[in-house]
């Protein structure tokens, strides 16, 4: 049987946020291209967005009853030992019945029990760490897995150096040549061609602080001659949809045509989740990062600083928005040199072959 026709069984686990789900789907898609007969199974957390997004991408998924540990003492924390035992027990059943040839984890709580069980059954395991500061799940799994694909330098502080491969984060392939789509994208969104376009992104669920900022500064932004594509997140859409089509503003709960959104944008305001940062490097537009301070180990600020320290983006912390936002935004929009400089520098940091390289590492483990 030729390598391409081998019927490998591949299990992928990761989720909780888009940042863990989309890389897993991208890796699965690449492996499916290489092994059309392979069988895939995703494992996620029962009540999280992967239970919807993975089937939409055409894959089967099983859910575990698991969640992360909260920082303060809550009822959820008291439930954690029971959830963990339940998840480990179900992970044993899933691994036993599916019999995977390899297990791939992209972070998030669901991948912990699944990869722990797979590794203990001597199944080859690979994890992909998107952030510059790893999550607790991947730190705990590092000793048990064979390969760790990372997107940032200096992660040997957390992981065994002989297992680390710097690949970058998997991103959507349709972002690779957005320059050719600008005119089409502006028409798609019914935008004015002679006006600056600001794209506002708050992550897959939305970001309250960014939404509050945009609402408060709509008049100011109007004076800056910008039109706005504002992805406010589905949690906030009902609150902000009243601004739709006022003062050249378009409000969306979620953007399905991200390639067009990026192609239409002249300036982007974004959170600094790992997947977003990787995409923005490929897109190569001037970015203002407003990291979420409410994430484990403040990893979004660390992700943003990795870019800012290369003179490739602007960072404004949430607590500084009041003082800094208008000033930094007007300086950026009034200087086409600064826009060009940031766009060129961020593009230099792009790792465009991540998905292919991660799949190469998976194939090496399968061939062993």
Image (cartoon, rainbow, N blue to C red):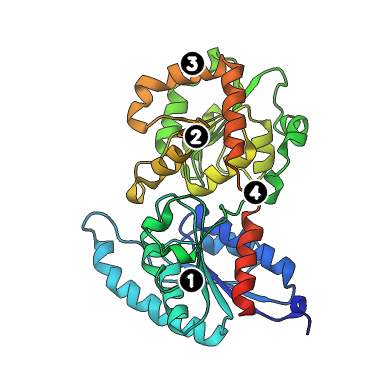
User: For the residues carrying marks 2 and 1, which lies nearer the camera in this image?
Assistant: 2
| Mark 2 → mark 1, Cα distance in angstroms | 40 Å
The residue to which callout 3 is attached is 220
- Where, by quadrant of the figure, is residue 69 drawn? bottom left
Residue 86 can be seen, yes or no: yes
Cβ atoms under marks 4 and 1 closer than 8 Å = no
| Mark 4 → mark 1, Cα distance in angstroms | 31 Å
- Foreground pick, 185 / 10: 10
| Mark 3 → mark 4, Cα distance in angstroms | 36 Å
What is the number of the mark on residue 63? 1
Sequence-wise first label, 4 or 1: 1
Q: Residue shown at 48%/66% (left/top)?
A: 163
The residue to which callout 4 is attached is 352
Image x and y of residue 160, in percent: 41, 65
What is the number of the mark on residue 326? none
Q: Label 3's element?
A: helix
Q: Quadrant of the N terminus?
A: bottom right
Sequence-wise first label, 2 or 3: 3
Sequence-wise first label, 3 or 1: 1
* Above or below, 208 relative to 61: above
Q: Residue shown at 46%/33% (left/top)?
A: 308
Cβ atoms under marks 2 and 4 closer than 8 Å = no
| Mark 3 → mark 1, Cα distance in angstroms | 46 Å
Q: Residue shown at 56%/45% (left/top)?
A: 278
């Amino acid at each position: 049987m030729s390598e391409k026709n081998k019927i490998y069984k591949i299990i992928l686990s990761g989720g909780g946020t888009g940042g863990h789900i989309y890389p897993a789907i991208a890796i699965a898609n690449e492996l499916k291209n290489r092994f059309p007969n392979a069988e895939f199974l995703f494992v996620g957390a029962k009540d999280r967005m992967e239970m919807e997004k993975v089937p939409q991408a055409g894959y089967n998924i099983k859910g575990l009853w698991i969640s992360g540990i909260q920082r303060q003492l809550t009822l959820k924390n008291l439930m954690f030992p029971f959830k963990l035992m339940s998840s480990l027990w179900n992970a044993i059943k899933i691994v036993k019945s599916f019999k995977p040839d390899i297990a791939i984890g992209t972070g998030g709580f669901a991948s912990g029990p699944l990869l722990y069980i797979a590794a203990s059954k001597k199944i080859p395991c690979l994890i992909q760490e998107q952030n510059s500061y790893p999550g607790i799940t991947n730190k705990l799994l590092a000793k048990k897995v064979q390969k760790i694909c990372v997107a940032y330098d200096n992660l040997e502080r957390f992981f065994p150096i002989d297992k680390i491969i710097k690949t970058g984060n998997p991103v959507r392939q349709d972002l690779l040549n957005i320059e050719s789509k600008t005119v089409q994208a502006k028409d798609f969104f019914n935008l004015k061609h002679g006006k600056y376009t600001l794209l506002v992104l708050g992550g897959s669920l939305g970001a309250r602080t960014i939404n509050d900022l945009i609402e408060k500064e709509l008049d100011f932004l109007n004076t800056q001659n910008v039109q706005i594509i504002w992805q406010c997140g589905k949690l906030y859409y009902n609150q902000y949809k009243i601004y739709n089509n006022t003062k050249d503003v378009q409000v969306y709960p979620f953007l399905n045509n991200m390639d067009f959104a990026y192609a239409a944008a002249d300036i982007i305001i974004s959170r600094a989740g790992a997947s977003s940062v990787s995409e923005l490097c490929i897109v190569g537009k001037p970015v203002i990062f407003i990291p979420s301070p409410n994430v484990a180990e403040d990893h979004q600020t660390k992700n943003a600083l990795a870019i800012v320290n290369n003179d490739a983006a602007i960072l404004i912390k949430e607590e500084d928005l009041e003082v800094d936002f208008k000033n930094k935004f007007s300086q950026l929009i009034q200087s086409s040199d600064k826009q060009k400089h940031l766009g060129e520098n961020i593009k230099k940091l792009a790792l465009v072959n991540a998905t292919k390289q991660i799949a190469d590492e998976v194939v090496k483990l399968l061939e062993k």
